[in-house]
Amino acid sequence: MNPKVRMAIFVVCGCALFAIFAAGLSRLHPVGFAAGPATTYSEFVNSITVPERRITDAVTAVNFDIRGFDTLGEEYIMFASVLGVMLLLRRQPDERDGAPIDKQKGRRIPSPSDAVRILTISLTGPLVVFGVYIVVHGQISPGGGFQGGMILATAPLMIYLSGEFESLRKLAPRWLVEVAEAIGAGGYVVIGAAGLFASTAFLHNLLPPGQPGDVFSGGTVALLNVTVGLEVAGGFIVLLLAFLEETLVRRDPS
Amino acid sequence: MNILQALILALVAIGGLAVVLTRDPLHQAMVASFYGILLALLFFVFQAPDVALSQIAIGALALPLMILLALAKIRRKDANEEPRTRP
């Protein structure tokens, strides 16, 4: 098939696709408006989140309470993908670890300038506080374990940028990060199973629900957010360490 | 739809095109990261702050990191072999 024929087929098919797509889009409802009256599901969610579950963020209520079991699966998708990456990036028999150096021959890793050092060091503390804030306020405002865990994971990155790879290794050794990730992944199941054994259902809310808008509200939902935060932060830092080891430490036999 | 929404939709369209048209994978990782931030802004403008926060984490941080990780692994293997010319 020569390029001309190919182009002709693409133009015809592209035009047809665009026509169908445009026709479909033109029937859409305006942004922010549901089709006709509010659907039953959204009404149901809105009717129970604040009065019954004492959670003011409806998204968190859906993720961690109404569909808490789905989130368990999502947490383990993250766990399994980190596991897969670590399996692929493990040290091969013919590789060895050396001191962290730049891959470019004859160039040392440039030490960070004062501006970078001051910025990253002064950002580290606020990042940790902000990450914890996002994790523990998941049931009140947008955010939660997943987003907060990701913010927490950027704090070690700041430490790496402010100094050497060795200082990151000392502060966040691989075993510590892996233990945090494992506690996060297992904690969700433990909390869920506690509901199963103490009551009738997996993830049954055992703790007092508290007042809506309070940090200690939502019962086990707050705890579940903490476990997911640990898991995500741990998993992401493991990936970060793997990346830095792959680029700075691994040597091929030569 | 207000002006802000139309503007961010147009920016996302341009950003998506930019990701596709960038040919070098290393550059593409950076462009994809920027595109991730644009998508996060889109979600925020359309009043989905939870999704926007997740999108910043995944699209702007995790995805480029995974691409860089894969590139680092491939390039180190390549460095031992004969330097290849691009087809």
Image (spheres, coloured by chain):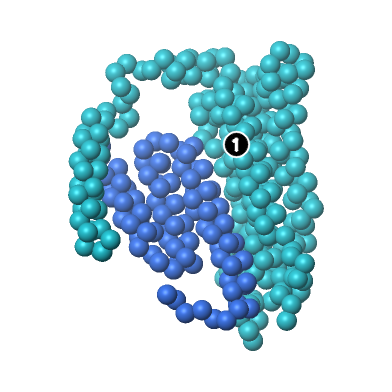
Q: In which quarter of the image is residue A143?
A: top right
Task: Identify residue type, mark 1.
Answer: Glu
The x and y percentages for residue A191 are: 73, 27
Of residues A131 and A75, the one nearer the viewer is A75
Q: Is residue A170 left or right of residue B13?
A: right
Q: Residue furthest bottom?
A: A106
Q: Residue at x 51, y 79 (%)?
A: B84
Q: Mark 1 lies on which chain?
A: A
Q: Which residue is drawn at 28% across and 50% down?
A: B10
Tell me, by letter, which chain the rendering colours blue. B
Q: Is residue A90 left or right of residue A3?
A: right
Q: Is residue A47 left or right of residue A251?
A: left
- The N terminus of chain A: image quadrant: bottom left
Q: In this view, does B60 lie above or below A2?
A: above
The x and y percentages for residue A253 are: 74, 77
Q: In which quarter of the image is residue A204?
A: top right
Tell me, by letter, which chain the rendering colours cyan. A
Q: Quadrant of residue B32?
A: bottom left
Q: Which residue is drawn at 32% across and 30% down?
A: A32
Q: From the image, tell me which residue sits under label 1.
A: A74
Q: How many numbered marks, from 0 up? A: 1
Q: In this view, does A248 lie above or below B59?
A: below
Q: Residue at x 56, y 65 (%)?
A: B71
Dot 1 falls on a residue whose secondary structure is helix
